[in-house]
């Protein structure tokens, strides 16, 4: 299964990185950095917020936007209303680099930036803080319960917010039990790469209003975002639909408008009068 392969590769990679750059060096690198930007606050805006993703390829989509400059995409996303950025830093499967996150964060103005990678070790959270990430991804399916809880606690201790990703009712329960405050439902099965765009809608009632709810993957059309808005979804994480678009900014603005509060949509349609 693809997730097992990714996790095995990531464990080897993290071990090599830890040997090359000890944990103490990461702690020193993060000293004096400005405080992380508040992802939770960014996603609590009225309507459905858009977390716009930067990646060059994926196991499910193949080559998406080869060689795309992270800074250019970040500026485009910020200019067209993204609430936050998601930056893939995995090199082997997604063509990303840590430097992409730093460049995107600098280019985006004040948007919070999620380091999207496959976290299997506490070292990666210190690493995320050292490269000035504002939030990290924790995948329930990839982590035993005790490890998930420990990583979530460590993330909060480092002032990093965590998007805790699920794919089933049982995984939502595990995320809540671990103390997750931002819960994502990935419509794509990371074992088979099959996508069910209705999954997030079905699992939305399981997440209390006190938590933020993010729908991930398979969201590409305005009508989907409108459905998610009606169900009380706080945000969508969109990558492939933007990266394949001829004009990613225009596609982002279209999706954002579909999830906007009705008053804003009416004002926009009427020219703001």
Image (tube, rainbow, N blue to C red):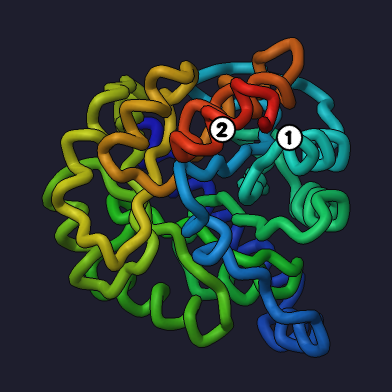
Q: Does residue 153 sit above or below 63 in this rendering?
A: below
Q: Which residue is disc 1 drawn over?
A: 80
Name the spot of residue 27 as percent of width and height, x first: 71, 86
Asked if residue 110 lies left or right of residue 238, the reply is right
Residue 44 shows in this picture = yes
Instruction: Please tell me which of labels 2 and 1 falls first in the chain.
Output: 1
The residue depicted at 36 percent of the width and 41 percent of the height is: 4
The residue depicted at 35 percent of the width and 51 percent of the height is: 213
Asked if residue 245 lies left or right of residue 151, the reply is right
Q: What kind of element bears circle 1?
A: loop
Disc 2 to disc 1, how far (Cα)?
Answer: 9 Å
Residue 11 shows in this picture = no
Q: Quadrant of the N terminus?
A: top left
* The quadrant where residue 153 appears: bottom left
* The quadrant where residue 3 appears: top left
Q: Which residue is disc 2 drawn over?
A: 256
Name the spot of residue 230 as percent of width and height, x first: 29, 35
The residue depicted at 86 percent of the width and 42 percent of the height is: 71
Mark 2 and mark 1 in contact? Answer it, CB < 8 Å.
Answer: yes
The residue depicted at 57 percent of the width and 59 percent of the height is: 42
Decide: few, some or many residues near mark 1? Use Cα within 10 Å; few <14, some 14-19, many ≥20: some
Q: What kind of element bears circle 2?
A: helix
Asked if residue 68 lies left or right of residue 40, the reply is right
- Closer to the camera, 233 or 270? 270
- Closer to the camera, 110 or 71? 110
């Amino acid at each position: 299964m693809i997730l097992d392969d990714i996790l095995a590769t990531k464990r080897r990679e993290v071990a090599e990185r830890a040997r090359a750059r000890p944990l103490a060096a990461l702690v020193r690198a993060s000293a004096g950095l400005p405080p992380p930007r508040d992802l939770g606050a960014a996603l609590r805006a009225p309507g459905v917020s858009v977390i716009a993703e930067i990646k060059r390829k994926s196991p499910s989509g193949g080559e998406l936007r080869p060689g795309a400059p992270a800074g250019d995409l970040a500026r485009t996303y910020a200019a067209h209303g993204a609430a936050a950025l998601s930056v893939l830093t995995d090199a082997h499967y997604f063509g990303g680099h840590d430097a992409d996150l730093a460049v995107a964060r600098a280019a985006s103005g004040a948007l919070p930036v999620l380091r999207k990678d496959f976290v299997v070790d506490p070292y990666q959270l210190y690493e995320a803080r050292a490269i000035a990430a504002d939030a990290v991804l924790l995948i329930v399916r990839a982590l035993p319960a005790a490890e998930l809880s420990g990583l979530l606690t460590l993330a909060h201790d480092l002032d990093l917010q965590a998007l805790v990703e699920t794919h089933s009712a049982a995984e939502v329960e595990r995320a809540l039990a671990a103390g997750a405050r931002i819960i994502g439902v990935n419509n794509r099965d990371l074992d088979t790469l099959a996508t069910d765009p209705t999954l997030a809608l079905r699992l939305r009632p399981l997440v209390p209003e006190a938590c933020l709810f993010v729908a991930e993957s398979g969201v590409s059309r305005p009508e989907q975002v409108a459905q998610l808005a009606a169900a009380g979804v706080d945000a969508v994480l969109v990558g492939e639909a933007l990266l394949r678009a001829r004009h990613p900014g225009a596609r982002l603005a279209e999706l954002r408008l579909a999830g906007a509060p009705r008053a804003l949509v009416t004002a926009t349609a009427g020219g703001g009068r």
